[in-house]
Amino acid sequence: MLRVANASRSYGDETVLRNLSIEVGSGEVVAVIGPSGVGKTTLLRLLALSLEPDEGTVALDGTDAWAVDAAERRALRRRVGMVFQEASLFDASVARNVEYGLRVRRSWRDRLHDEVAGLVRSNGVADAVHEALDVVGLTQKVVQQADSLSGGEAQRVSFARALAYEPDVLLLDEPTSDLDPRNTAVIEDAIGEARDRGIGVVAATHDMHQAERVADRVAVLLDDGITEIGPTERIFEDPSDERTRKFISGELVY
Ligand SMILES: Nc1ncnc2c1ncn2[C@@H]1O[C@H](COP(=O)(O)OP(=O)(O)OP(=O)(O)O)[C@@H](O)[C@H]1O
Ligand SMILES: [Mg+2]
């Protein structure tokens, strides 16, 4: 569904990603693992259609996002949700933050329907906000101001906002970096929930065990590109690339 093909990207004269290819299908979870600074966030930004590759293509359902005009690219971008490494909430209540995801979504898919539905819509929105917060275990925080949340709560609200948005593809950048084990499990369950809804998920994570728990496939990013990508079990138990084996076993330290 969302496919990066032979993409390269540099910042100045530093090439971060070189000739990289990766794809995610609906209802599939792909984990991206690799050391700090290797280019995981850069890869997610390529997938989010917010960063243009210097070479190669990024296509959603076969449409090359950088070969179409800006309006069409914006329409493609709306089908992709991203939860950033740093939670980015507005200075408003938790409910308003989650509702924002819904409004953006509705503004393009359901606008006509909403106009007709009138009052029904406000109930529908409230239900969807509640449902998304329920997935991350934060329904009790619905009226709290976002800037008074703990770091981990803010991270979970960001996730709920992305889920409420019902993207076709959900990109997660270190989704549990601020979370304790219990809330990490909450988010990992929520990733499973997204998959069950047919959403394609790409999650960058430092936590190899998390990749092992949640992913259908794992991409190992070392030195300029994807060293290896394959079914999770094979990557962890029988990697074909020697560098992958060393990275996973902890012998290769960056
Ligand atoms: N806008 C930018 N301008 C210049 N260099 C950048 C920019 N964004 C990223 N970089 C550099 O590109 C490299 C890859 O960064 P990126 O954020 O993709 O790494 P990462 O794998 O996500 O790291 P981490 O695990 O620490 O989050 C780093 O060396 C970073 O300093
Ligand atoms: Mg990063």
Image (cartoon, helix red, strand yellow):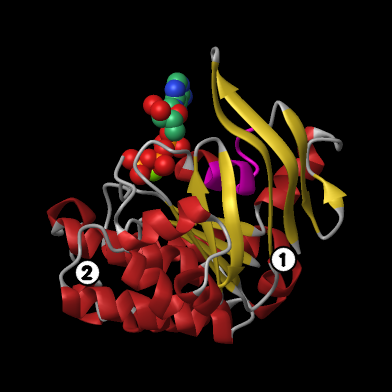
Which span is picked out in magenta? Answer: 43-51
Q: CA distance from mark 1 to mark 2?
A: 27 Å
Q: Is residue 111 visible?
A: yes
Assign the C terminus to one quadrant of the image: top left
Q: Nearer the viewer, residue 233 or 106?
A: 233
* Disc 1 target residue: 109
Q: Residue at x 62, y 29 (%)?
A: 9
Q: Which mark is residue 143?
A: 2
Q: Position of residue 129 (x, y in %)?
A: 41, 75
| Element class at badge 2 | loop
- Residue at 60% across, 38% down: 50
The total of numbered circles placed on residues is 2
Tell me the quadrant of the picture where the N terminus can be found: bottom right
Task: Please tell me which residue is depicted at 56% across the width and 77% down the height of the picture.
Answer: 121
Q: Is residue 11 magenta?
A: no
Query: Are the two marked residues, 1 and 2, in contact with CB atoms closer than 8 angstroms?
Result: no
Quadrant of residue 64 within the rendered picture: top right
Q: Position of residue 213 (x, y in %)?
A: 39, 79
Q: Residue placed farthest to the front in the image?
A: 242
Residue beneath the point at 35% across and 71% down: 210
Is 115 on the left or on the right of 243, as rendered?
Answer: right
In the image, is 196 to the left or to the right of 66? left
Of residue 129 and residue 6, the one placed in the foreground of this image is 6
Q: Nearer the viewer, residue 29 or 79?
A: 29
The quadrant of the rendered image in which ligand 1 is seen is: top left
Q: In this image, 228 relative to 8: left or right?
A: left
- Return the disc, 1 or 2, that comes first in the chain's sequence: 1
The residue carrying pointer 1 sits among few (fewer than 14), some (14 to 19) or many (20 or more) residues within 10 Å by Cα, namely few
